[in-house]
Amino acid sequence: MLCPYCRECPMAGRPKKKIDTETYVGQFATKLTSLRIKAELTVDGLAEKSGISRAALYTWESGDFTPNVEQIEMLADALGIEPHLLLPRRKKPAEKKTVPRKKK
């Protein structure tokens, strides 16, 4: 089976799953994948350039896990970007709308 992201790397029997882009992990996965593709790197290429295993990159891009701070710095160096660009932006909480109570 080919990698669902770059279509080049074999993934041993892993089914393609839909990533929930509303979650922090999902946003990170989407951002990492798009930055890797923008840098014209395959998962293998990013693994070699960053010193991070392909398996770890697959789990991060599939939205299963997120890397620690040190790994984010290694990814950023390999992609030629600042580490904060890999981090998803947190959404501001919606303001609660208050509905006036009816007087009896």
Image (spheres, rainbow, N blue to C red):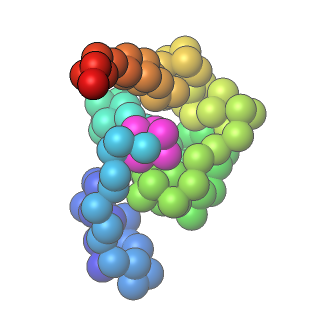
Magenta-highlighted stretch: main secondary structure?
helix
- Asked whether 49 or 69 is in front, the reply is 69
Q: Is any part of residue 81 visible from this angle?
A: yes
From the viewer's perspective, tell me whether residue 102 is left or right of residue 46.
left
Q: Residue furthest front?
A: 104
Instruction: Please state the horizontal and vertical placement of residue 47, each as a whole percent of the image.
Output: 55, 49
Taking the spot 51% from the left edge, 27% from the top edge, the residue there is 87
Q: Residue at x 28, y 61 (%)?
A: 18
The answer to which image quadrant residue 7 occupies is bottom left
Residue 33 in view in this figure? no
Spot occupied by residue 85 in the image (x, y as percentages of width and height) = 48, 19
Figure quadrant of residue 56: bottom right
Q: Which residue is farthest bottom?
A: 13
Quick one: quadrant of the C terminus? Answer: top left
Is residue 49 a member of the stretch shown in magenta?
A: no
As drawn, 44 above or below 87: below
Quadrant of the snapshot with the N terminus: bottom left
Camera-side residue of 89 and 48: 89
Question: Which residue is more in the foreground, 17 or 1?
Answer: 17
Question: Residue 92: horizontal and vertical position, in percent?
Answer: 42, 18
- Residue 15, compared with residue 56, is above or below; it is below
- Which residue sits at x=51%, y=60%? 64
Q: Position of residue 102 (x, y in %)?
A: 25, 22
Taking 26 as reference, is 8 left or right?
A: left
Q: Which residues are magenta?
A: 24-29
Residue at x 33%, y 77% (from the top left corner): 15
